[in-house]
Image (cartoon, rainbow, N blue to C red):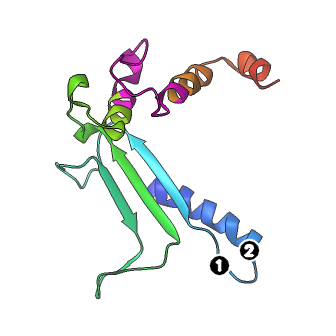
Amino acid sequence: YHRSVFYGTKVYDLQVEKYRPAYICPPAYVIGIMEGHLAHEEWAESCISRYKFTDIDKMIVGPETFSLIFVQLGFFRKEKDECVDVLDQWLYCLQHMYELDDLPESFDGDSGLFNLRDASEIAAFDESKKIDYRR
């Protein structure tokens, strides 16, 4: 959690340099995909947690500046045949990527999961193969 805040604020800070002197920057988002779950959450129905700046006395969400989104795969409990929408399919594939040779046939071909498969194959290239691929 703390490292995500650090990295996200660095991204936002880099934008400030670009948009000076107005200091009105596009929002910055950090999306963390976790194998387990955040230490302060014991169980949650949803495996996605969203954090934003909030006035805690008035419970008013602040301006859209910086958001942390955690995908906590430790809370995702669905089996392959229970994945009924694109989000479920993504979560299942992320959770089981290490053991999948290919995408399950029942999963939606328009979900972008084929891009995830290709990207994960490229990410596994050794350094020289990555250089060749980029050429």
- In the rendered image, the quadrant that contains the C terminus is top right
Q: Nearer the viewer, residue 122 or 107?
A: 107
Residue drawn at 56 percent across, 56 percent down: 7
Q: Residue furthest bottom?
A: 58
- What's the residue type where badge 2 is placed? Tyr
Start-end of magenta stretch? 93-115
Q: Is residue 1 visible?
A: no
- In the rendered image, the quadrant that contains the N terminus is bottom left
Residue drawn at 60 percent across, 25 percent down: 123
- What's the residue type where badge 1 is placed? Ile
Q: Residue furthest right?
A: 135
| Pointer 1 with pointer 2, Cβ within 8 A | yes
What is the quadrant of residue 101 in the picture? top left
Disc number at residue 24? 1
Residue drawn at 55 percent across, 28 percent down: 115
- Is 12 on the left-hand or right-hand side of 33? right
Residue 98 pos. (x, y %): 40, 19
Question: Does the magenta run of residues contain 44?
Answer: no
Q: Which residue, given by chain and number where applicable, does mark 2 sit on?
A: 19
Question: Does the magenta run of residues contain 99?
Answer: yes
